[in-house]
Amino acid sequence: MEPTGAGVIQCWERLPEDLLVTVFCQLGIPDLLRSGAVCASWHAAYRTFRRVRLPSPKQPPCLLYSCKNYGPDAAGLYCPSTGATFRITAPCGGFRNLTLIGSTDGWVIAADEIGNLRLLNPLTGAQAELPPLSTMHHVEAAFDEEEGGLVYDIDDNLFNQRSMVRIPACEVRDLMYFKAVLSCGPHAAGAGDAACVVLLLHMPRCELSYARPGDGRWMWISPDAGTGLEWRSLYCDATYNKNDGLFYVVRDDDSVHALDLTGPSPVARKVFDERRWSMSLQSTFLDDVYLSCGKPYRYLVHTPSGELLHIWRFRKCVGPDDSSSEEDDSSSRDLLEDLITKDIQLYRTDFHGKKLDAMDSLDDHALFLGYNASLCLPTKDFDGLKPNHAYITDDSLEFVNYFKHNRKEIGMWSIESRNFERLGGASSLEDPWLNWPAPIWIIPSLL
């Protein structure tokens, strides 16, 4: 005799907790969150899973974004691997008041309304405090009645001379931070809080500072302290290599330094020399190299096999008539121009030959580029991801922070056909993720 529908439901509710926990270990984060809301017994098993901090399987990157339909304290999570969308109630509160400048291991680095940074896991609401902005080597906090309260006096050391710039606290996060990279999440399995290091690229001219959760101040990586770093160095990107425990940073001249931040003082060494533009760029881009947005934005990313790739992303300003979008309400924009990707070039680092070898394909891998720590992942591990594609979000400080209502470029760049594609199955989400804060790739984590 077949069991009735009620019997089936009752049977599922009575599954042993240890069996449910075992099943939960095999689920993706969105499915796991849904499973915890099925009924009281499943929620209890979900709480046990969370309490014993069991790992989940490899998670595909998801797009974390704000949506006015979700309200100010919630966020959307879109998975390009499955096409699924998940609404999360960000327990941090005021999600739409944050600026996101980095993500690693499911954690984001966020700036609040007065420019202070903190680590946040948007799925769990866990937070870790970072030193205040006023503890950076070139920043002083002050009170200015004319500016309406808290301000920061920032020494931009123009032409190697003291030069103070006063910025209201409500504006400083739009100017100060270029990007942040984490060594690991603050609660990573098997790692203490001391293992979590935040490397910050900040004004003026993309200098470097770092801190750990709970530190009293930011440590400046001074070019005058025997580090071998360049003065006012124009660093473009950073990546952390879990295999050797070092950060790698790239300048706008292609030079790369490796940073050891584990000791009492930072240690840096140059591992790849600077290159002249005539040696670096393909001829088709030489004519535009000195124009606005002519130089590429540079990314560093380690492949699963350990190779270090240089990724160059060329962008161009276009007017509404040149945009690929058919619908456009230009009246709501801050600027009647968009910044769009025109090309992405790949280079493999040849440390021995001191050269960059051009690549024409990622083969069965995909890139994730933006404010997140750059990722290169094998698509065989994640059904639905397209090989030989770069999944991209906006990360231009000027366009993201100064023109908050302009279109955000979010989609896929085909390395083979060299064109931009929309995210599959995401048409209904096109409008919601145009809002603030700018969307960012994260790998969901409950740890």
Image (tube, rainbow, N blue to C red):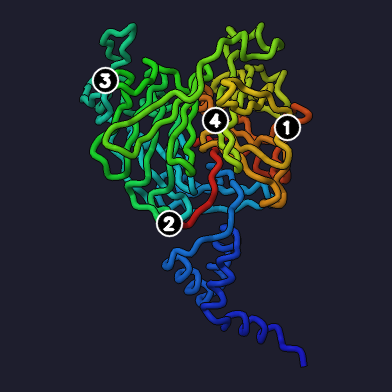
Of circles 1 and 3, which is in front?
A: 1
Question: For the residue marked with disc 3, what is the amino acid?
Answer: Asp
Pick whichever of labels 3 and 2 is earlier in the sequence. Answer: 3
Q: How far apart are marks 3 and 4 (CA)?
A: 32 Å
Q: Distance between the residues labelled 1 and 2?
A: 34 Å
Pick whichever of labels 3 and 4 is earlier in the sequence. Answer: 3
Q: Is mark 3 on a helix, strand or loop?
A: strand
* Mark 2 lies on residue: 189
Q: In this view, does 404 lie above or below 317?
A: below
Q: Residue 5 in the image: state x and y as whole percent.
A: 70, 83
Task: From the viewer's side, name the closer residue of 254 and 356.
Answer: 356
* Mark 4 lies on residue: 300
Q: What element carries label 1?
A: loop
Task: From the viewer's side, name the closer residue of 34 and 52.
Answer: 52
Q: What element carries label 4?
A: strand
Residue 432 appears in the figure? no
Question: For the residue marked with disc 4, what is the amino acid?
Answer: Leu
Disc 3 vs disc 4: Cβ atoms closer than 8 Å?
A: no
Of circles 3 and 4, which is in front?
A: 4
Question: For the residue marked with disc 1, what is the amino acid?
Answer: Ser
Pick whichever of labels 1 and 2 is earlier in the sequence. Answer: 2
* Mark 3 lies on residue: 153
* Mark 1 lies on residue: 361
Q: Distance between the residues labelled 1 and 3?
A: 47 Å
Q: What element carries label 2?
A: loop
Q: Residue 362 in the image: state x and y as whole percent.
A: 70, 35
Quarter of the view holding residue 155: top left
What is the crowding at mark 1: few (fewer than 14 residues within 10 Å), some, or many (at least 20)? some
Question: For the residue marked with disc 2, what is the amino acid?
Answer: Ala
What is the crowding at mark 3: few (fewer than 14 residues within 10 Å), some, or many (at least 20)? some
Of circles 3 and 2, which is in front?
A: 2
